[in-house]
Image (cartoon, grey):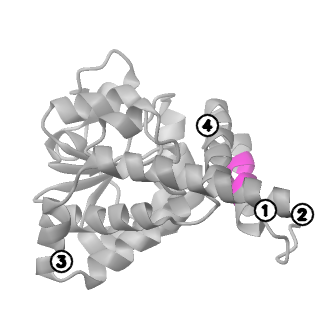
Amino acid sequence: MIPKDHPRYASLVRREKIAEAAKKGTVAMEGVGSHGRGEAFDYLIGEKTTKSALTAEKTAAALFLKAERPVISVNGNTAALAADLIRDLQKATNAAVEVNLFHRTEERIKNITKLMEDSGVVVVKDEVSRLLPLSHDRALCTREGIYSADVILVPLEDGDRCEALVKMGKTVITIDLNPLSRTAKNASLTIVDELTRALPNITNAAKTLREDEAKELISGCNNKKTLDDAIKEIMENLSDAVDREIQT
């Protein structure tokens, strides 16, 4: 049991969820390492939603609301950490949800789909084909889901699929704690925040944004600036940490 008064309670709970899901096979063992890498970057931003991240989350909501065929792509880590939050976002935006895996087995697809559906998510389960220009199993997707999306959220993403989707003309939103990753640099919009903090912010914005606000956010969307701001916030956080150490 993790005591609720532990200063890093939320982070430790997420870690336990990933570990348990890995034991069940929902999360690939490689996904455990990915989660740890994300935790390290979360330390750098102070384990909080930064100003630039909140703006990106509101922009993501605006893009979803203006989309004709919004889709949320889900992998094992996302399902283990945030199935209920994906449900809430789906309800707020009417987005389709599709399971898409790099380490793909039919058993994992089945288990993740069941996990999502048990949380109230409606999952696209049409026939899959190799529709994306990739040599690995991320290329497998449904024609009615990911292939037809105009706006797609790809949290905890692989950089090559993100790049491929952008080249196909899709607006790709990613949630990535590492502003230096290939995914972050290739996406149309990168949210440098932890998944379970970011998703509720997107959902809340989708419920409350006015049309004029949404238009302004979309017109001002500049992913390079978003990443530059995130890096500046990391540097400021590190500088503040050094100052605190000096003072003590």
Type of the residue with mark 4: Ser
The Cα atoms of the two marked residues, 2 and 4, are separated by 34 Å
Q: Which residue is mark 4?
A: 34
In percent of width and height, residue 74 lies at 42, 48
The kind of residue tagged 1 is Arg
- In the displayed structure, does residue 65 sit left or right of residue 233? left
- Left or right of residue 30: residue 134: left
Q: Is residue 17 magenta?
A: yes
Give the label, 3 or 4, closer to the camera: 3
Q: Inspect the image, locate mark 3, and give the three-letter code of the amino acid beneath it.
A: Glu
Marker disc for residue 51: none
Give the magenta range: 14-20
* Residue 213: mark: 3
Q: Amino acid at mark 2?
A: Thr
Q: CA distance from mark 3 to mark 1?
A: 38 Å
- Helix, strand or loop at label 2? It is loop
Residue assigned mark 2: 248
